Amino acid sequence: MSLLELVRQQSLSIAPDVVRWRRHLHSYPELSFQEVKTARFVADTLREIGLNPTEGIAGTGVVALLEGKNPSRKTIALRADMDALPIHEANTAPYASKNPGVMHACGHDVHTTSLLGTAKILFGIRDRFEGSIKFVFQPGEEKNPGGASLMIRDGALKNPAPAAIIGQHVMPLLPTGTIGFREGMYMASSDEIYLKVIGKGGHAGAPELLVDPVIIAAHILVALQQVISRNANPRQATVLSFGKIAANGATNIVPNEVTIAGTFRALDESWRADALQKITTMATGIAESMGGQCEVTISRGYPYLENNPELTRRIRAAAEEYVGKDKVVDLDITLGSEDFAFYSHQIPASFYRLGTRNEAKGITSYVHTPTFDIDEDALSLGPGLMAWMALRELAD
């Protein structure tokens, strides 16, 4: 039996274990940097497989090293994220979240258990490849400063240093069995924008006695769109969106302050820095011109994610071998963001998509929604696919 066929066979045979692991983690999701039980489950499972994991990296991160023959020849890293989102699950499946208000609505339970499956496959054939494979299970992908940045800080990419890192993410827009790739620029940087507009509140029927922060906030919200429409290069994708505004007044009460929260996305670090400065200058200037103040707080998030072209071509070729060329598709640039980007600024990295959509089963909800779920048939494919990518990358 060829090595490719062996990996396919093993991926199918362990699928019931991977489904069981995934349903367990889906039932007990934990928020960013609180993945204590999740990390313990990961470490215990790795030990059952036969590996010796290192725990407590970046708080709750777990790393394990698998050595094949001639282990110092080359090292490849494979990454999964473990955290869930503050969403109350609307699904009624038996494995639905048992933690109210917390849900694996972005598929990190899939990423984690799929990588555990990959580790199990590769451990069983460790005498069939040269080099080493580092399994990286990281916390906090959904929250600044991003668990990836902390994993790097705490040495996850050292001892041994991987030559490249590969990451997988579910994609509910792609049918199960389909794999998506994009070379070069793929995902945007992401920064959080917090504005506090300060005025002088009072009775809504006496506007002459007030400095109305609601009106000031409205002017700021509209004006800041000029940062995009009149400052950004129109050939370059960029987004400024505000999703939260709180005035906490009443029909006849103007509050003293208004708070606003939003996000800024870009695909260029120079423009990113310039735009953030323009946002600050414009917001404070408008508030002052109208007699108020605006305090601007920017939480710097993830950089843009760039898939190394050469690495991406190689793992795409491996995917074509594994699932067939007709099941491999091109991805478009997205203004979504991912802290996997931090790895891509350190070593050659590639982030690909695993299709999880099944319209016949009614599995069509997008990520970050209360009804998100996956077609679990993807779990018979994901572990073997990543294992085969790692093996081909070690062999190159």
Image (spheres, helix red, strand yellow):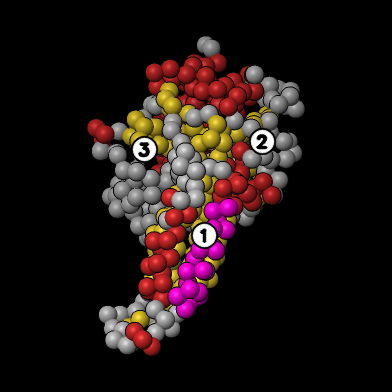
Indicate whether 118 appears above or below 275: above
Which residue bears the numbered disc 3? 172
Q: Which residues are magenta?
A: 274-293
Question: SS of the residue at dot 2?
Answer: loop
Look at mark 1 in the image and give the residue it sits on. Answer: 279
Label 2 amino acid? Ile
Closer to the chain start, of discs 1 and 3, is: 3
Q: CA distance from mark 1 to mark 3?
A: 34 Å
Mark found first going from the N terminus, 2 or 3: 3
Number of other residues with Cα within 10 Å of mark 2, as a class: few under 14, some 14 to 19, many 20 or more: some
- Kindly state the secondary structure of the residue where label 3 is placed: strand
Residue 93 % position (x, y): 30, 47
Q: Residue at x 41, y 69 (%)?
A: 217
In the image, 324 versus 297, the foreground residue is: 297
Predominant SS of the magenta segment: helix
Check disc 1 and give the amino acid type: Ile
The amino acid marked with disc number 3 is Pro
Badge nearest the viewer, 1 or 3? 1
Magenta stretch: includes residue 291? yes
- Tell me: 158 left or right of 345: right
Answer with left or right where residue 278 lies relative to residue 230: right
Q: Which mark is residue 347?
A: 2
Can residue 112 be spotted in the picture? no
Figure check: 329 above or below 102: above
Residue at disc 1, secondary structure: helix
